[in-house]
Amino acid sequence: MTRSRWTRAIALLFAFGMAATACGGDETGFAPAIVEDPSADAPDASGDDAPAGAGADLPAVETDDDEADDLGQMVVAEAANCAEEMAAPERGTFAPSGDFSFAISLGVNSLNPHDDQTPATFTYYSWIYEGLVRQEADGSVVPWLAQCWETSGDGSEVTFYLHEGITFHDGAPFNADAVVANVEFVKTAGPPQVIPPVAGQLGIVDTVEAIDEHTVKFNLTGPGEILLLSGLIRNSGLMVSPASLGNAAAAPVGTGPYEWARSNPDFTQNDLVANAGYWQPGLVGLETVRLEVAIDQVARLDSFNAGQYDAAVVLLNDLDRMLTGDITTNFTVRIGFVVADWTGEQIPQLANREVRCAMAQALNRQGIQAQLNDPDSVNNQFATGPSDYAYIDDLDVPEFDIEAAKARFAATGEEGFTFTNGHLPSGFWPVLSSAWGTALAELGITMQNEALDPPNGGEMFGRLARGAHPVQIIPFNEPNALMSLVARTGEAGFNPSKVSPDGVVDLVTAARGKNFDAGEADVAAAWKIMLEECIFIINNTLTTVVAYQDGVEGVHHTQGIPIHFWPHGVTKS
């Protein structure tokens, strides 16, 4: 059984070999990762470039594996129970100060974390709710409500040891029974309380059981710690008080550092107050918080410059208009287009690969991102560079060439056609959609772009799930390359055709049954097919920006989650 206290993403990018980090370390360092013998059956290997000395209280010897040495990986001794080695967290003193306002560029339907799976909406939920684990500013995954976890040798059981003394805002204890109640609710409740994509995040879970008050075991359908943790760092892992399950929209009750006080009817203003009973009281730095929807970027930045907001979402191409404060940035999700109707059910021409690839060849990634003041974010695959997990070094997808694209489309003999694309109404979404639409018009293809109504992530993914648009702009927002394929191929909810090109489902199935390192080639091969078939057409890796005023401390943009920072430790002087 392997033990985990800290887990660092391979190459710092969404690639979670989660089975593998040792108990030990502190808030500033990561424990060295366990590296299993590659000939062993246990599906638990990971990458970790932890600083030397982290977890030095554990006996360790360096592995002989050259690649593992390059990653700073270590082999550590086993322990019977990771929780026995855990020190109590530094809880600090409850001393909140000041009122805080955050202007956000998108809205929510409610403060129920299970009816929306858009990562950016963590900007709302994370003030109220927490999970067993969470994703840090550098992309690493660390225990949170759980102090550590262990994974069985065959990878089919993951046991979490919970911190003691934690309560929900309504006074109910956070314990193993509460975890079981949440997981079973997410898996079985269904819409409208739990949307299918959120339930699907825990698809690897067969059953969950309380071993004792502070120990909970997840029994998986097969080796799948990576998929489990990838789900638990998203909406499905946010813990709601058992009394509020089924009613979280009206009574949003979690364990987080701030309690819900009130919202207006359309949730454009959401007021929170400091949680005096928080289990780490020193991390509650503010007395009150207002989370406010401010869709219009110009008005939002003007209000920030005028001092009306303490923090605000800002666009890269508007940074020269900032008159005050500082910023925190991070790369997050991949943005591109999905040819949802690639089998040609709605538009027969889209079943022709050459048509799809001609469309891809008309996408001027560099020009569009230069217009958005973010030319370095151009990307045509999930991985962002050769050192990233599942990078495809021989990827053959069309580069921008409008004349070649026109000739390619003409050579198909297909007639032009019209389709609709739904996009979020502000920011880069309409810019990217309009630019590609203009290029496609030169091929004789009409792309009718419409703003989503309601303008939120739930509507965007809802339309994708039901195939409302033959081609749709979309974020590839799963936390790693494997999970993104699981969510978007075969019978998955984000694959409206319910079929995939030959070989893709087999590759994904094979990767799910292996440890993370052993499955990397399968993951890359599946992505290569989807990209070279011009079904996934990725444009860039999104860089998002949060601005904050002078006197505000502790705002650190979280890698992999757009426009999000954890509120724990944020203060205002």
Image (spheres, rainbow, N blue to C red):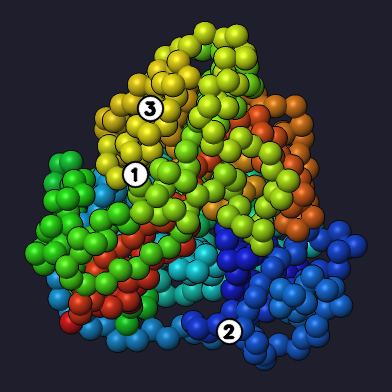
**Label for residue 200?**
none
Q: For label 2, count other residues whose C-alpha is less than 10 Å away and answer few (under 14), some (14-19) or many (20+).
A: many
Amino acid type of the residue tagged 1 in the rendering: Phe
Mark 2 and mark 1 residues within 8 Å of each other at the beta carbon: no
Amino acid type of the residue tagged 3 in the rendering: Thr
State the residue lying farthest toward the right. 39
273 or 291: nearer the eye?
A: 291
- Residue 540 location in percent, x, y? 49, 47
Which residue is painted at 47% across and 46% down in the image? Answer: 366
Residue named by callout 1:
428
Work out how far the residue at label 2 is from the one at label 3, CA to CA, in angstroms.
53 Å
Which of the two discs, 2 and 1, labels the residue nearer the N terminus? Answer: 2
Q: Nearer the viewer, mark 1 or mark 3?
A: 3
Which residue is painted at 66% across and 72% down in the image? Answer: 48
Looking at the image, residue 467 sits to the left or right of residue 121; the answer is right
Residue named by callout 2:
25
**Label for residue 438?**
3
Which residue is painted at 49% across and 74% down in the image? Answer: 163
- Residue 80 location in percent, x, y? 73, 77
Residue 565 visible within the image = yes
